[in-house]
Amino acid sequence: MASHGIKDQVAIVGMGCTTFKEHWDRSADDLMIDAVLETLTSAGVAKDDIDAWWLGTAQSGMSGVTLAAPLKLQGKPVTRVENYCATGSEALRQACYAVASGAYDMAAAVGVEKVKDSGYQGLNAFPIPTDGTQRSLTAAAMFSLVAPAYAERYGVDPKELRRTLARIASKNHANGAKNERAQFRREMSVDAICKMPEVAGMLSVFDCAGVADGAAAAIVVRAEDAYDYTDKPIFVKALSMVAGNGSGLLDPDFDYTHFDECEEAGRDAYAQAGITDPRRELAMAEVHDCFTPTELVLMEDLGFSKRGQAWRDVEAGAFDLHGDLPINTDGGLKSFGHPVGASGLRMLFECWLQLRREAPDDRQIDTVDRGLALTHNLGGYPGEMVSFVGIWGNQKG
Amino acid sequence: MRGIIGAAGYLPHWRLQRSAIAEVLGGATGRGTRTVASYDEDSLTMAVEAARSVLVDGSPAPAALWFTTTSPTYVEKTNATIAHAALRLDGDVIAADAGAGLRGTAATLRSALRSADPAVLVLAGDVRTGLAGSTDEGSGGDAGAALLVGEDSAGAPVIAEYLGGASATREFLDRWRVPGEPRTRSWEERFGEQRYSALAGQAWDAALKDAGVDVDQVRSVAISSPHARATAALSKRLGAAGVDVVDPLAAQVGFTGAAHPSLLLSSMLDSAEPGQIVALVSMADGADVFVFRCTEAIIGRNASQPPGVADQIAAGDDSLPYAKYLSWRGVLPLQPPNRPEPARMSAAAAERRLDWKYGFVGSRDRETGALHLPPARVSFVGGNTDDMDPAPMADVQATVATFTVDSMAYSPSPPTVFAVADFAGGGRLPVEITDVRPADVSIGMTVEMTFRRLNTADGIANYFWKARPVRSAASTDTETGSD
């Protein structure tokens, strides 16, 4: 038994992504329709050409009817999937496997979230009946636990770490400012971010992902058919997913400075794709920067920095738009916004643009010749999360 | 020999300076402090905390648990069964409420002392309220108290032998409260003073006769009453007879309602010595007098007891603003964070996890020793399945591995202070820290578990455990020297 992957067996031939923002005037139906229409146009196909659909939404609807009804699909299989904040990547993963298996010629993955209709700040999960002993912290507070633990373990002055985290947010704001689809398009200086009041541990609201409505979609075909639809297909190099068993909440050996699920998913994905030096082989990565400490430790979990060194690499600008390895060139969750079910597909959308050299000039990466991009999408909390890593390439191997 | 095997009071961490009331409302500036139940405490949680101090290794299993409060979490539903679950008592132990009257504590103590059961647990707790600026608000206090009553045994000796007692009853109207109201109303106080004076005199004389002792043999007396003038009058009378009247804790604690008789008895025993004869007088809609003789076992008890009443008085935090006190009592509703309020717990899910939710019992993998909080069927170390022992963790201390302060989460009193707690000997739980100022939390600090009410939804009080900074151990030298 092994994780073989489906390297170069399937390809993405069309994508679409709505703007992410507070879409007070658009329903989840509207957002799905907009993303799907853009995607169909991108691939030059009609909705009836799609043989099977996967819809990722965390809590904007249940069952495949959520997509089939607004699009008026006729007699097609539609499956709704949910995997915390990695929901969009999960929908994509299922569509890729469906085509690779030979079951379908063409599959679509759609992700959507209508977050802002709840009337509350932040993300709020459906209440599942429980014994009442579950903690009730915000996600920001759960991820803020990483900061003091990281500072303690690596001997980083908390004030220094505060600036490092602000630098991550500032970078993502700078990238997002160049992205017309992003929720927040204002640059923010490190000093300004450091001055914001703390809301969860040392984190301020500027350390948190934007909460937005939005949708994104992708069309998947067999690799050998890809050039029938586009001259610049994006080939699937690796798909990896790990659901943690929650032992970080039980095990005193877990020290809140790394996420095992992300490290394991990364390792599996690199093996599938044949990557041995991700920092130099990848042209870019879109990672799940739900909160600034998350992006910090992901640099280590995904092998971009040595353990305990990510904060130095961040300070040195290694992950800036024109750094060694550009990270979150579209602004990331921080600046692009985080409609839960759509985010995994949004990450792929940026890789799609960059690897096809279609990103706006002021955002185009210098490293595109490396030809490979990574998306990392997690859901849950430190100690109990799901993690997805996908690797994408503009050349068939 | 039958008597008191264990006695403990529980004083909440927070204190309100009485001067803080006048600073807001004007009027005469009171002196001293009153104890204040935190927003996550109630009459039941405080009684449980006190009971945990008397149910120690070697204690006899009580056959009955009686709980008294005038501020119950529930009517119709019995509150005592929640204490029964939190204290992990056996299923054949009766647990019941004594009713909402102040006299219930004396009644359950009398019943326990005269019972044929080998041991009975007498619990009481109260959150004392009153209208803003009222005498009840300023002179009241919040506390829990526990008495373990039973037969003397080698493993669990009686520390105060019951010598005898008496009661006196005559209906008269002194104080009354309509269920659900925060305020208690009272009659002109000289009327009650005289009624109590007569009843207490009658019960006192009868109790001494029943105990077979003369007044000059009584070393000290604790007098508990909601009626301050009646207390003062009786104190003066017994003092003149040469009896040492123990501090009623009015200056720093306040009158703690149903908890007060047991709290004062516990406080008196904290500094008592073998052979001393002590008495407890409770005046609440009648008078009840109990006479005890302290045994040699009180020396060991006072050396090993968790923080005594005096220690707890000294350890409180009196920085609580009056406005926050009012918000904790629901008088001054504060704007909560814009987050959904918690959903009510599932009764079925809570019952399935009774030992976890109320008793804080995890599970330990028999093969690897890996500890699971909450209990699990499959081990996170090695995957061993359905091979676990229960692991009671309520009395195990923990160390803070990392922590945060959450200003955005819903809480009855934001912000939420939260830590990852690693237990001595293994086991971890990410858990809320209470009774702490956010700035005082640090990695490496030691915490202990405390039974609290997390929230209330749909009228259902959701109880579970939180961590709090470890309370300092008893200092026996200062305790025994206090009289």
Image: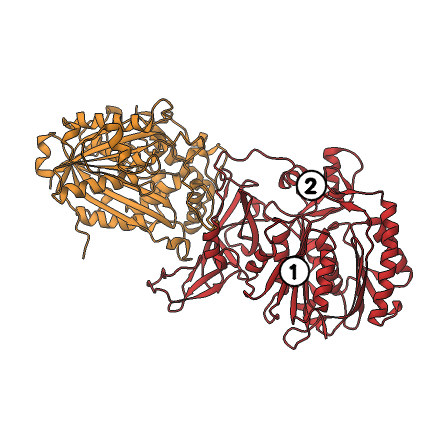
Chain colours: A orange, B red
Residue A317 image point, x, y percent: 33, 36
User: Which subunit holds the residue at mark 2?
Assistant: B
Assign a secondary structure to mark 1: strand
Residue at 36 percent of width and 62 percent of height: B379
Number of residues whose C-alpha sits closer than 10 Å to that of mark 1, classed few (under 14), some (14–19) or many (20 or more): many
Q: Count the numbered circles shown.
A: 2
Q: Quadrant of residue B181?
A: top right
From this viewpoint, is residue B300 visible?
yes
In this view, the residue in front, B166 or A347, is B166
State the image quarter where residue B184 is shown: top right
Q: Which residue appears farthest toward the bottom when viewing the image?
A: B154
User: Residue B438, how many percent across, how many down?
Assistant: 56, 44
- Residue A150, relative to residue B332: is it above or below? below
Amino acid beneath label 2: Pro
In the displayed structure, B110 sits above or below B76; it is: below
| Along the viewing direction, whichever of A260 and B338 lies nearer the viewer | B338
* Residue in the foreground of this view, choosing between B166 and B248: B166
User: Residue B66 shows which numbered tag?
Assistant: 1
Give the numbered dot on residue B182.
2
Q: Position of residue A217 (x, y in %)?
A: 23, 32
Q: Is residue A254 left or right of residue B441?
A: left
- Spot the residue most to the top: A25
